[in-house]
Image (spheres, grey):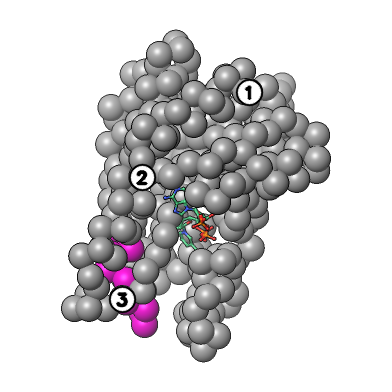
Amino acid sequence: MKKDLFSLQNKVAVVTGGNRGIGKAVAGCLADAGADIVLLDLADPSETAAEIAREYGIRTCGLVCDVTDPQQVQACLEKGAETMGTLDLLFNNAGICIHTNCLKVSPEEWRKVMNVNVSGMFFVAQAFARWLLDHHKTGNIVNTASMSAQKVLIPQQMTSYNASKAAVWQMTRSLAIELAESGIRVNSIAPGYICTEMTSTVPEELQKTWIRSIPFKRMADPSELAGAVIYLLSDASTYTTGACINIDGGITCL
Ligand code: NDP
C-alpha cells in the first residue's frame, strides 16, 4: 500500500455523546488513528477529552452541547473549529433509549426519544455540513443507527427507539444523496448489543436473554465498533456513501 488508507492524521473529528459509552471508546480509537478530537456531550466532557489527549498525544477539546438545540449545536461546532483550527469528520452518535410498552409510553417519553435520536442527530449533521460548505471543505459523517432499525428485538418493548433508529437509517441515505455532489459522504453503523451504561442498567436476566439470542453468544465491547467508523471516516471508503454497516455478532442475519 502506498499510503495508510485508514489514517486520520491531520483531521479533526467531532464526536457527539462522547463523554461515555460508544462515543468515548470510538473517540479514543479515532485519536489512535491520528485525529484530533472535539467531544460534545450533555455532561461536561472536558475531563474525558483531556484523558484522550494524554493517552494518544493528540489535541482535544470538550464542550457541553445538547444536540436537540440547533443554536447550541452551531455555536459548539464554531467553537470547536476555532479551538482546533478546522473540522473534517463527524461521528454523530448521541442517543437515548426508553423501554416502555407502546400502550403506556407517554407523549413526553415519545417526544424525548425522537428529539434526541432523530432531530438531534439531524441538527448536528445539518450544522456540520453547513460548516463544511461555508468553509469550502469536503468531509465525512457517520451516524449511529442500530440493529433496531431493521429488527424488532424481544422481549424489550421500545417502539419509540426502534422507530427513531429506522429514521436514522433513512436519514443517512437521504443526506448521502443530497450531499453527494458537495463531496460530503454520509454513512451509518448499526451496532448490536454493546456493553455501555445504556445497556448496563437493564436487569441481568434480560442481558442473559440477549446473549442467548446473539450468534456470537456475547455482547460487544464499544471499541469493537471503531474499525467500521474509522473505515467510513477515512480514505479507505472514498466511494462509499449511504451505507449502513451491521456490527452485531450476526444477529441481523437471523
Ligand atoms: P450511553 O447512554 O452510554 O451514552 C450516550 C451519551 O450520549 C451519553 O454521554 C449521554 O449524555 C449523551 N447524550 C444523551 N442525550 C444527549 C443530548 N441531548 N445531547 C448530547 N449528548 C447526549 O449510550 P451508548 O454509548 O450505548 O449509545 C451511543 C449510541 O449508540 C446511541 O445513539 C445508541 O442509541 C446507539 N446504540 C447503542 C447500543 C448499545 O447496545 N449500547 C446498540 C445500538 C445502538 P448523558 O449521560 O449526560 O445523558
> Image check: 69 left or right of 94?
left
To which quarter of the image does residue 51 belong? top right
Q: CA distance from mark 3 to mark 2?
A: 22 Å
Label disc, if present, on residue 189 of the rendered structure: none
Q: Position of residue 88 (x, y in %)?
A: 54, 25
> Residue placed at 53% from the left, 42% from the top?
64
Question: In the rendered structure, which amino acid carries the disc numbered 3?
Answer: Thr
The image quadrant where one finds the C terminus is bottom left
Q: Nearer the viewer, residue 96 or 150?
A: 96
x and y percentages locating residue 122 in the rendered image: 33, 40
Amino acid of disc 1: Met
Q: Earlier in the sequence, mark 3 or mark 1?
A: 1
Q: CA distance from mark 3 to mark 1?
A: 41 Å
The residue labelled by disc 2 is 68
Residue 70 location (% of width, % of height):
35, 35
Disc 2 to disc 1, C-alpha distance: 23 Å
Q: Quadrant of residue 151?
A: bottom left
Foreground mark, 3 or 2? 2
Q: Is residue 109 left or right of residue 136?
A: left
Residue depicted at 66% across the width and 42% down the height: 46
Mark 3 — residue? 100
The residue at the point 28 percent across, 27 percent down is 178
Q: Is residue 212 visible?
A: no
Q: Which residue is mark 1?
A: 84
User: From the Cβ of disc 3, is ligand 1 less than 8 Å away?
Assistant: no
Q: Which residues are magenta?
A: 154-163
